[in-house]
Amino acid sequence: MAEDAIRVLDHGFVRLDGSMATDLSVVNAARVSFARRKEEMDESDEGLIRFLMRDRHGTPFEHNTFRFHVRAPIFVAREWFRHRVGSFNEFSMRYAKATDDFYVPEPEDVRSQVGKPGAYSFEPVDDELAERTREELREVYDHAYETYTRLVEAGVARELARSVMPVGAYTEFFWTVNARALMNFVSLRAAETAQREIRRYADAVEQFLAAKMPVTHAAFVAANRIAP
């Protein structure tokens, strides 16, 4: 894992592979309407960003881009890919051999679902059930990967052999996204209602937003984390 990456879960990470993102570019995108351009930020520009965020004038934020390299369980990636404003390229088990890295939750992350669909909550399970769950996951993963390897070595095409791999297997992808869509992702996926695993990734993504665009991020937080 690269030094500039943020570790997530047991085998995952989020790494900022590249960006074209500054608070000043938001200001200049907005002020072009008046044929004005700034070279440095001042307090009035910070106020402009807060206004744009609060009143949801979103297009000036779309002129900033982030390119992330992500390693996550397949079930996390499938939720992530529901965010359609952006570009994705993913590791393919059709062309490359699958790895033997699988997601095993920490004991405190093994949880039960309580309540009706759409109105349920999650509660921790007892230590015995948590450890049994982790052990059974490992057994299933080991069996699946052994089967996958055996099929590939027997000559079965990877594009078919991959069908035995569970959604707890890790995948990798690149995600290029503008700042507005990134904030929408964080707003939804870092929320308490999102699945715990993808929340961890959304938290990591948000750290990069805050580092590159601190004024924008502060305005986002002040606006109750609602994307413009």
Image (cartoon, rainbow, N blue to C red):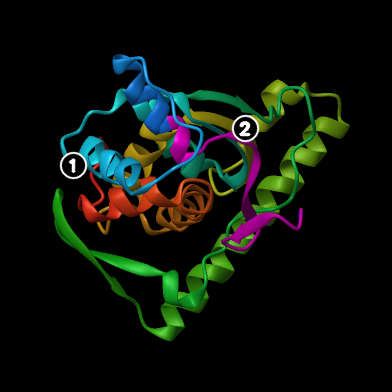
With 10 as the anchor, is 182 left or right in this view?
left
Tell me the tag on residue 174.
2
**What percent of the width, then of the height, locates residue 215?**
39, 50
**What percent of the width, then of the height, locates residue 149?**
80, 40
Q: Is residue 112 above or below residue 162?
A: below
Residue 81 visible in image: no
Q: Residue at x 20, y 53 (%)?
A: 224
Q: Which residue is mark 1?
A: 54
**What percent of the width, then of the height, locates residue 122?**
26, 66
Within-10-Å neighbours for mark 1: few <14, some 14–19, many 20+: some
Instruction: Locate the N terminus by quadrant.
Output: bottom right
* Frontmost residue, 168 versus 153: 168
Q: Amino acid at mark 1?
A: Arg
Q: Magenta segment: does it hold 40?
A: no
Q: Residue at x 56, y 32 (%)?
A: 175
Secondary structure category for the residue under label 1: helix
With 27 as the anchor, is 68 left or right in this view?
right
Count of picture labels = 2
**What percent of the width, then of the height, locates residue 81?**
45, 31
Q: Are marks 1 and 2 in contact (CB under 8 Å)?
A: no
Residue 119 visible in image: yes
> Which portion, as a residue range, is magenta?
2-25
Q: Residue at x 45, y 76 (%)?
A: 130
Instruction: Locate the C terminus by quadrant.
Output: top left
Secondary structure category for the residue under label 2: strand
Which of discs 1 and 2 lies nearer the camera? The answer is 1
With 53 as the anchor, is 161 left or right in this view?
right
Q: Amino acid at mark 2?
A: Phe
Disc 1/disc 2 C-alpha distance (Å)? 30 Å
